Amino acid sequence: MVPRTSQAGPPAGRVRRLATPLGILATVTAAFAYVGTVDPNEPGHYPVCPLLKITGAFCPGCGGLRSAHAFIHGDLGAAFSANAVATTGYFLFAVVWVLWLVRAWRGQPLRIALAPAWWWSIGALLLIFTVVRNLPFGSALAP
């Protein structure tokens, strides 16, 4: 008996390959939907950043929820004002996710190999961002 092949749906391997990027997208979408409906600008909805509470200094993530809320509502100016690094990260995530999805569709692994110099540069930029947003002349970067 000759096995029959069905062209009705995608191969099981493709579905399996797409499951992880689609699952990640579903999780991120749910998180953004929650932040979009529960306003972080109103006190009492989210915990206060521990670093801010203890030291009074803004960490690189401070303002990230307000940034995500503004981003969801289409206010890119307010999103960048709340946390420019987080807002840039949203766009970077979208690009990497689309690349991941396309490569998964084609059956290719997603390999993002950055040289150590790039990782050190990213860390240095986050450190500079954190320091500058806590200084008087960098108050425009504070949430």
Image (spheres, grey):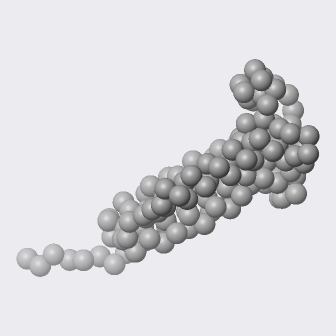
Query: Is residue 8 at least partly visible in the picture?
Result: yes
Residue farthest to the top? 54
Q: Position of residue 91 (x, y in %)?
A: 68, 62
Quadrant in the rendering for residue 15: bottom left
Q: Residue placed at 71% from the left, 41% from the top?
A: 61
Q: Is residue 109 left or right of residue 137?
A: left
Q: Residue placed at 56% from the left, 52% from the top?
A: 120
Looking at the image, residue 10 lies above or below residue 136: below
Query: Is residue 143 at least partly visible in the picture?
Result: no
Quadrant in the rendering for residue 62: top right
Q: Position of residue 101 (x, y in %)?
A: 49, 67
Q: Which one is in front, 92 or 75?
A: 92
**In which quadrant is the N terminus drawn?**
bottom left
Q: Residue placed at 77% from the left, 41% from the top?
A: 131
Q: Residue placed at 62% from the left, 53% from the top?
A: 122
Q: Is residue 90 left or right of residue 80?
A: left
**In which quadrant is the C terminus drawn?**
top right
Quadrant in the rendering for residue 108: bottom left
Q: Which one is in front, 117 or 140?
A: 117
Q: Which one is in front, 21 or 15?
A: 21
